[in-house]
Each structure stands twice: as C-alpha cells, then as structure tokens.
C-alpha cells in the first residue's frame, strides 16, 4: 500500500494532541516510565523476547497511526461519483475478487467479518482488537512493533488498555507511543494479524507450541496464531480477496463527488462504518442494524448548507471515516454516503440533504453514539476530536498516540 507523506503541519498537530492526551499520565519523575506503556515490564512476557527502545512519540505517530486521509472531501461519496446509489434489496454482502478463490470454511453464523486492504476474514465475536508489526519511513522501513502481542480493546467496551486478556485481531497501527525493536515475538493467545509487516506466507511452530500460518490474500497478508491447528484452518479458510467487503465497505476510499441533493426515499435499514488509511485503503469496517441506522439519521438532520466549491472537508484529519446508510422502501433500496471528519478545527459530518445542498452537521452524542459508543473497534483505530474539544463522545475514540 502507498505510504503517506507528512509535513510541518502534521508534526504540530501530533504534538498538540499527544500533549493533551498524555498529560494525565505524566510521571512526577522525568526518568520514570509513562503509565500504561510497554516499558512497564512487570508481566511483559507473553512470548516477547526482544529488546526495548524508546521512539520519539511525535515522529512515530505521524507515520505509524492509521491516519486516514487529508483528502479533498466536499460532499457525498460514491464509487461512481454520484450522491445516491440504487442497490437491489437482496444484493450480496460481499464482492469477491475473481482472482481469488472464495472462502471454503464453514463457521458459526455469529462469527464477525474483519477486513483490511483487499482481504477479509471471519473470527469469533468475542475477539478483541490490537496492533501488529509495521514498517515506517521514520524507522528506515525496519519492522517495528508499536503494539505488543495482545488486545487493547474488547467488544462492547470503549476501554483502552494494554495486556487485555483474550484473543484478538491486529492491524499495523501504532497502539502505543513506545515501540520495540529486535527479534520478533508472537501472540500466546489465538490471534489474527492483518497486513502485518515481516510475515512470509507459510507455516512455523514456536517452541511453546504456538503455530503461525500466513497466507497472501487480496494484496496483503492474513496471519493466524494458535496452538489449535484446526482453529487456524477454520479461520484462514474464511479468508478471501474482496473489492467490497461483507459489511458493504469498498476496499478503496470512494471518490468524492460534487455537491448533490439526496432524495431521502425509504427508511434507514442498516448503517456501515468504513474507515480508511491515509492512502485511501480500507482499514476496518463495521455494520449496525436498523435501530442504530435510524438513530444516526435522526441525529444528522440539522446543519448548515454547503455550497458548491466550499473548502469544508479539505485539509488534514486524523482519520477518514465514511458512513454508508442504506434506506429501504417500496421501490427497493438506496444508499447515502456520509463523511465524518475529526480534525484540528473541530468535528463534523458532511451529509447529503433531501432539501438541497449537503449539510455540515456538528458531531454530537446523538450522531456519534449509534456507531461509536462501546465499540471496541472504533476505540482501537479511530482518532476522534480536535485537541481543544472536550465533548463526552470523545472518550469513545482513541488518542492520536493510542
């Protein structure tokens, strides 16, 4: 995937957010480790046999975070460039790439979809979320671990913390501002890493009995760890290349279109959360039911109209999140694409409007809560809010350094 580039404005933004986020964790002694960092070695075992080293947090954050797009984003998003999209009521939930065989494993219906880049896989619903080894320009493209080998968040919770017990899905995201080098370790729990750096397709068994198997899927890698070979086969058997995943999120950021009106036909039937990295590649996706979709739509009805040519939505933002709202009516289904921006000047949505031009809707608990509250995946990967904002909903997102 294309690596992002950064400038002085990124550095200033990262420094401000880092200072705000970690102010409460600062130790009284300057030589003491920051609370909650990887340097707190008590219990820091878990298959990790490597040396530790400090990395400049501000520089690390700029390259390491899954920091999506400071792209021009004026309005409605759509793969075809239009503001609304007609979809068949019974359309398949995933578009499988013809270059890759479909998944063959049979898994329980409650297993959830996890996507990254052009790959998706299914895992048990109790698994949490964490990071994975990554390569960053600031470290000479060396494989760097800014996550450890454990979960940071869990389903149904907005709590963020290291060494959370249990299985997890990891992505190459900076989960902490302390990064490790040296020989690689491995998870001691069941885990799947998506797009992890340094993973070669194949299988190996570690001395403690943990098995690693990596497969190349959809232009990236899917790596499973477990002492249970049958579980690895079951999970990796669901891995497949897609162009649109099972949560209805395209694997590439939908391109922006001109200001356009929205018909508003039908009732909200489902809501997809599609998050993209700075290169515009799918970072993760999530989907919510009609109740959440209706609550979100109700919370995005009032805002300021945006005229053609407006520069609203331009500039650098911590993350680029697109919300796909599906409306179902007597004549079928239609899709509305909204955008969520959390940047230096504040947080807001750009929402197509049935009455005219696109609306600029301020972020609030009413429109953030239906998809972000107690959502461990959002807490793990999405930075929320400007450094000067103190809204309650910000606690449902992560800080810029984790």
Image (cartoon, grey):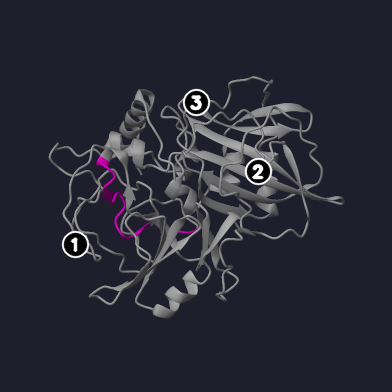
The image quarter in which residue 11 lies: top left
Alpha carbon distance from label 2 to label 3: 25 Å
Alpha carbon distance from label 2 to label 1: 46 Å
Label 3 crowd (10 A; few <14 / some 14-19 / many >=20)? some
Q: Secondary structure at mark 2?
A: helix
Magenta span dominant secondary structure: loop
Q: Residue furthest front?
A: 99
**Residue 97 position within the rendered picture, expressed as x and y whole percent measured from the top left:** 60, 58
- Up the image or down, 142 lies above or below 127; here it is above
Report the mark closest to the observer, 2 or 1. 1
Dot 2 or dot 1: first in sequence order is: 1
Left or right of 120 on screen, residue 6: left
Alpha carbon distance from label 1 to label 3: 41 Å
Quadrant that contains the C terminus:
top left
Dot 2 or dot 3: first in sequence order is: 2
| Residue located beneath label 3 in the image | 315
Q: Secondary structure at mark 3?
A: loop
- Report the residue at 68% width, 46% height from top: 325
Left or right of 329 on screen, residue 215: left
| Residue located beneath label 2 in the image | 296
Dot 1 or dot 3: first in sequence order is: 1
Label 1 crowd (10 A; few <14 / some 14-19 / many >=20)? few
In the image, 383 versus 214, the foreground residue is 214
- Report the residue at 24% width, 66% height from top: 47
Q: Which residues are magenta?
A: 139-155
The image quarter in which residue 65 lies: top left
| Residue located beneath label 1 in the image | 49
Can residue 61 be seen by looking at this rendering? yes
Residue 140 within the segment the image draws in magenta: yes
Residue 46 within the segment the image draws in magenta: no
**Residue 147 position within the rendered picture, expressed as x and y whole percent measured from the top left:** 31, 52
In the image, 382 versus 105, the foreground residue is 105
């Amino acid at each position: 995937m294309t690596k992002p580039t950064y400038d002085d404005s990124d550095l200033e933004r990262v420094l401000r957010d880092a200072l705000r986020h970690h102010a409460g964790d600062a130790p009284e002694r300057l030589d003491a480790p920051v609370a909650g960092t990887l340097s707190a070695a008590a219990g820091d075992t878990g298959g990790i046999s490597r040396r530790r080293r400090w990395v400049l947090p501000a520089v690390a954050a700029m390259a390491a975070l899954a920091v999506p797009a400071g792209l021009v984003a004026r309005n409605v998003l759509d793969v075809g460039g239009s503001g609304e999209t007609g979809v068949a009521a019974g359309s398949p939930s995933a578009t499988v790439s013809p270059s890759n065989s479909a998944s063959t494993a049979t898994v329980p219906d409650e297993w959830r979809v996890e996507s990254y880049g052009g790959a998706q896989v299914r895992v048990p619903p109790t698994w949490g979320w964490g990071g994975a080894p990554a390569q960053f320009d600031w470290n000479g493209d060396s494989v760097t671990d800014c996550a450890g080998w454990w979960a940071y968040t869990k389903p149904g919770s907005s709590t963020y913390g290291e060494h959370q017990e249990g299985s997890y899905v990891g992505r190459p995201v900076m989960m902490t501002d302390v990064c490790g080098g040296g020989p690689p370790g491995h998870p001691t729990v069941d885990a799947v890493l998506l797009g992890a750096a340094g993973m070669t397709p194949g299988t190996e068994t570690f001395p403690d009995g943990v098995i690693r198997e990596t497969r190349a899927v959809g232009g990236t890698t899917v790596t499973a760890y477990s002492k249970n070979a049958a579980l690895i086969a079951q999970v990796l058997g669901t891995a497949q290349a897609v162009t649109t995943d099972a949560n209805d999120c395209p694997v590439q950021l939908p391109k922006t279109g001109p200001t356009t009106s929205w018909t508003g036909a039908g009732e909200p039937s489902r809501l997809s959360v599609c998050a993209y990295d700075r290169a515009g590649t799918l970072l993760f996706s999530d989907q919510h039911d009609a109740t959440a979709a209706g609550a979100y739509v109700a919370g995005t009805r009032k805002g300021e109209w945006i005229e053609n040519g407006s520069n609203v939505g331009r500039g650098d933002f911590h993350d680029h999140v697109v919300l796909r709202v599906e409306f179902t009516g007597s004549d079928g289904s239609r899709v509305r694409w909204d955008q969520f921006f959390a940047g230096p000047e504040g947080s807001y949505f750009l929402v197509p409007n049935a009455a005219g031009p696109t609306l600029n809707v301020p972020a609030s608990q009413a429109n953030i809560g239906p998809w972000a509250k107690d959502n461990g995946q959002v807490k793990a990967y999405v930075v929320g809010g400007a450094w000067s904002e103190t809204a309650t909903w910000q606690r449902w997102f992560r800080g810029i350094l984790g």
